[in-house]
Amino acid sequence: MSNVYATEKPYRARRTPDRAHYDKATVHAILDEGLVAHVAYVGGMGEPHVIPIFYARHGDDLLFHASSKSGLGLAAKQGAWMCATVTLIDSIVYARSGFHHSMKFRSVAAHGVTELVSGDDKLAALDFMVDRLEPGRAAHLRPMNDQEIKATHVVRLRLDQVTAKVSVGDAPNEEPEDLDWPVWAGIVPVTTVFGVPRQHDPSVSDAGRPALSGPLFRK
Amino acid sequence: MSNVYATEKPYRARRTPDRAHYDKATVHAILDEGLVAHVAYVGGMGEPHVIPIFYARHGDDLLFHASSKSGLGLAAKQGAWMCATVTLIDSIVYARSGFHHSMKFRSVAAHGVTELVSGDDKLAALDFMVDRLEPGRAAHLRPMNDQEIKATHVVRLRLDQVTAKVSVGDAPNEEPEDLDWPVWAGIVPVTTVFGVPRQHDPSVSDAGRPALSGPLFRK
């Protein structure tokens, strides 16, 4: 088992290679903190579509669900090649030149063939996705019925052609001769905040109440 | 001038049409609040790529920049058809069944041919993008030099084939017979928070200091 993804062209970072990372620890940490992946597939006329979707990483698999009647679900059923990108924005960078305005961010792009997960693996994957929102929650839910299971595709994108890009720090990346240009420069931090859970009125139980714990809810 | 985008197949919402909106007011409000678009283009082997990128809406144009040497920049120079998706997540929905777990969200997907903006329009577009981060800031910056201007493509995606999807409210969408299932149900609010601006050490001026005002910084 390698600790590094053997990403090849054209899925390696072409530019700013110093920001590119291929080690699994970096890739997994970003995927485990993200809430939504933007998944792209190519439609029947060769046109790209981008869909935001909840996902879960399970080992070296990226798992997500799709309605069996959606464009995304139909493409996955055909084993389409897709790209899933997860982006965490940490700050907006205000530089002294327009050119160096930027963001500090951590992102992962995963490319590969998709396949449908079926049978017991499918049920386990659905539970795994729910439990990402609150460990142990899936066991408390009203079980899926056959119609719901049929209406939902679980899609696996194997992590293989994967690139993480990471830009961190508090300082703009600037030309040295710009540093005394008379304009404010710095960063504005950007954070995703999860608020207090709001119970739905008819709720009758505290079982599975979200505790906002785990990598997804890192503060 | 129509107030509604005349979006056609396959860019109209196929499923959940009650969540789809094509009026410009809804589309523009979402685009003006978003910080990053996920832009997809199709590479030389027919493979989709998804890139997160800062953007600005200007009338019925979506403007973003790309390095002239990047895959995104090269595709834009060739007038590639792209899809730009902007997603605002408002809450995670915890339902009583796995099937109805969901999110409340507002998103826009814009599809169309890209083209490069050039000449004075290019410089104006770059300033417009900076001023989205703080009104009036661009006038205070060290002007772009020829090398920087050449290294940066400004890309226009005309808003035409556009679909907004909106799912709001505080209640899970559930089967009536599930409402007394003994599990906690409700939502966890999700918010993007912009922190206190942190000045870079050698900053010498308050000109252009971000006041976090405008649609982007809606609290």
Image (cartoon, coloured by chain):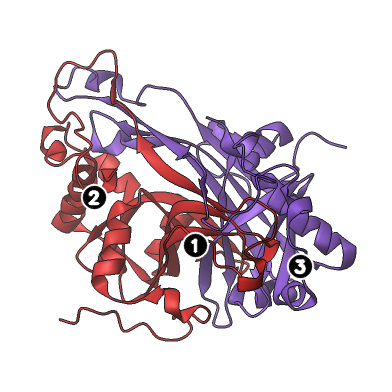
Chain colours: A red, B purple
At label 3, the amino acid type is Met
Residue A9 in which image quadrant:
bottom left
Q: Which chain carries label 1?
A: A
Q: Which residue is nearer to you in this view: A158 or A165?
A: A165
Q: In which quarter of the image is residue B43?
A: bottom right
- For marks 2 and 1, the one nearer the N-term is 1
Estimate how packed mark 2 is, as few (under 14), some (14 to 19) or many (20 or more) residues with alpha carbons within 10 Å. some
Specify the subunit that label 2 lies on. Answer: A
The nearer-to-camera label among 2 and 1 is 2
Q: Is residue B186 visible?
A: yes
The residue under label 3 is B144
Q: Which mark is residue A215?
A: 2
For the N terminus of chain A, the image quarter is: bottom left
Q: Any mark on residue A40, and which?
A: 1
Of labels 3 and 1, the one closer to you: 3
Residue type, numbered disc 2: Pro
At 30% from the left edge and 52% from the top edge, which residue is drawn?
A33
